[in-house]
Image (cartoon, rainbow, N blue to C red):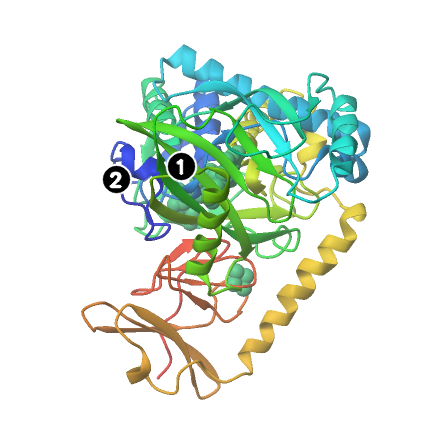
Amino acid sequence: METDSGRTTSVWMATADVPAGESLAGDTSADVCVVGAGIAGLSTAYLLTREGKSVVVLDDGPLAGGETSRTTAHLTNALDDRYYELERLHGERGARLAAESHTAAIDLIEEIVTEEGIDCDFERLDGYLFVPPGESTEQLGWELRAAHRAGLTEVEYVERLPYDAYDFGAALRFPYQGQFHILKYIRGLAEAIKRRGGRIYTGAHADEIEGGAEAHVKTSDGFTVSAGAIVVATNTPVNDLVAIHTKQAPYRTYVIGARVPSGSVPRLLYWDTPDPYHYVRTQSVEGHDVLIVGGEDHKTGQAEDFDERFRRLEEWARERFPMIEGVELRWSGQVMEPVDGMAYIGRNPLDSDNVLIATGDSGNGMTHGTIAGRLLTDLIVGRPNEWATLYDPSRKSLRAAGEYAKENLNVAAQYTDLLTGGEVESAEEVRPGEGAVMRRGLTKVALYRDEQGTLYERSAICAHLGCVVNWNDKEKSWDCPCHGSRYDPRDGHVLNGPAINGLAQAEE
Ligand SMILES: Cc1cc2nc3c(=O)[nH]c(=O)nc-3n(C[C@H](O)[C@H](O)[C@H](O)COP(=O)(O)OP(=O)(O)OC[C@H]3O[C@@H](n4cnc5c(N)ncnc54)[C@H](O)[C@@H]3O)c2cc1C
Ligand code: FES
């Protein structure tokens, strides 16, 4: 499967295809228009069709061609931000609702897999949280007690993992987690949506999103979808200029897929505790297993040492998993980190009541996306949902003020790039397959030369709020260091929001 979110290939893209979507060929209407066909958009569309709602889904790429195709698809209620931290930020009740909602999301995925007969390698397995060698295990004690208070009473402390080849040391065991093959699941979900009357259009870029009495989405082909409600599930909202984007930050994360003999690595989910952390699982493919190891995150547009990050991941993995026969896949993707650890799911702040969003997925986007399906469906059909306050996009996160300030000072610092020189003095310096930013008068241009030697020029000024983009040599894209917008290097079209439009033409 080819996607429009980068050049690298994940294990899912290498081993499954998704159905080609239909093209939108005229104006249409539905009860709900969902923009974005990743796990959040499709879970919402599916659950709405189960309520008897008519649904139109629009995506400007292929089905699940965004971050959903780049995931590692752990399904877990062991949340990245730790229960003791969630308790500090959201109180004991908040932490309990977080545990309850993520547990319910895994159950819901299992229910959908069974009911719709989706063959997607779904399985239940244990997950283990451990600290790096030489570090204190004290935080495992804090997490154990907080997880119990949050209702996860079966979480237990163990002296070591059920794995002989390496001693990871003491750990917490989270029982009854899950994993699946995401693209096989998406294929089944899309088929189920269509069976229930939903319509999915791909290659349909939403240019304008308007709520209110005459709510509608306009596509760049000039077609209009009128709807009673609009769900913007574009990973990061493309219909919101500022409100949400000061409360979350974009991070790139890296994954290797290594060939190991079938059954040689115990089927578990593995996570360690540093920031950034490592995340590990296996997936069976024909004739062998793939060991999937992720980590090495950095803020989008703020690093260039991509190969070094893959090298460090491989070194970390080889030390712990000596059965690795070779690394066959290397890919990266983007996650949105909310300042207070929980996704933003609900009504879009400062907008009409019938415009809803799902964002702030962090490393738990499979379950957050599924929670979005349930919560947004409840909001649209008018059913009370206990999780609504915890995930409310308008919530104030006063206890996360430190993280909020840190991320926004980091964004402010990126604007100084507008004043500095360029990376190259002339286009001749840009070699085939590479990109570089060049100063031209008062502005900057983004230069890319393809492998055949053709030069492409766009403005280097991000279409969202004007930061200068940086070259991503691994995914061959222009990445914005401020809020994570990403652009195609040839025609500058937008690959990731929050920008809704592409890079402008370069000024002469
Ligand atoms: C490497 C990696 C590992 C991860 N591992 C895990 C994990 O183990 N467990 C877990 O729970 N989560 C994990 N995550 C997070 C999870 O994969 C994501 O949070 C989740 O897939 C995001 O889904 P989404 O539907 O919000 O966004 P996406 O899948 O990005 O979908 C958004 C869609 O919107 C479309 N779109 C955007 N703008 C427009 C527009 N203007 N018009 C039309 N369409 C538009 C895009 O084309 C895209 O298809 C991981 C993420 C990465 C990158
Ligand atoms: S993503 Fe906000 S300025 Fe680029």
Viewer-proximal residue among 368 and 466:
368
Q: Residues within 10 Å of mark 2 (few under 14, many from 20)?
A: few
From what the image shows, is residue 293 above or below residue 462?
above
Would residue 207 be found to the left or right of residue 131 on screen?
A: left
Q: Position of residue 463 (x, y in %)?
A: 47, 65
Checking the image for residue 118, the label placed there is none
Q: Residues within 10 Å of mark 1 (few under 14, many from 20)?
A: many
Q: Position of residue 212 (x, y in %)?
A: 55, 41
Mark 1 vs mark 2: give the one in front.
Answer: 1
Q: Position of residue 86 (x, y in %)?
A: 74, 36
Secondary element type, mark 1 = loop
* Quarter of the image where the N terminus is located: top left
Q: Amino acid at mark 2?
A: Ser
Residue under the image location 78 percent in, 28 percent down: 146
Residue position for label 1: 37
Would residue 208 be found to the left or right of residue 23 on screen?
A: right
Question: Total of numbered circles in the picture?
Answer: 2
Viewer-proximal residue among 198 and 269:
269
The reply to whether the residue tagged 1 has its Cβ within 8 angstroms of ligand 1 is yes
Q: Amino acid at mark 1?
A: Ala
Checking the image for residue 23, the label placed there is 2
Secondary element type, mark 2 = loop
- Tell me if residue 453 can be seen: yes
The reply to whether the residue tagged 2 has its Cβ within 8 angstroms of ligand 1 is no
Residue under the image location 71 percent in, 60 percent down: 406
* Quarter of the image where the C terminus is located: bottom left
Q: Earlier in the sequence, mark 1 or mark 2?
A: 2
Residue under the image location 40 percent in, 35 percent down: 323
| Distance CA(mark 1)–CA(mark 2) | 14 Å
- Tell me if residue 233 can be seen: no
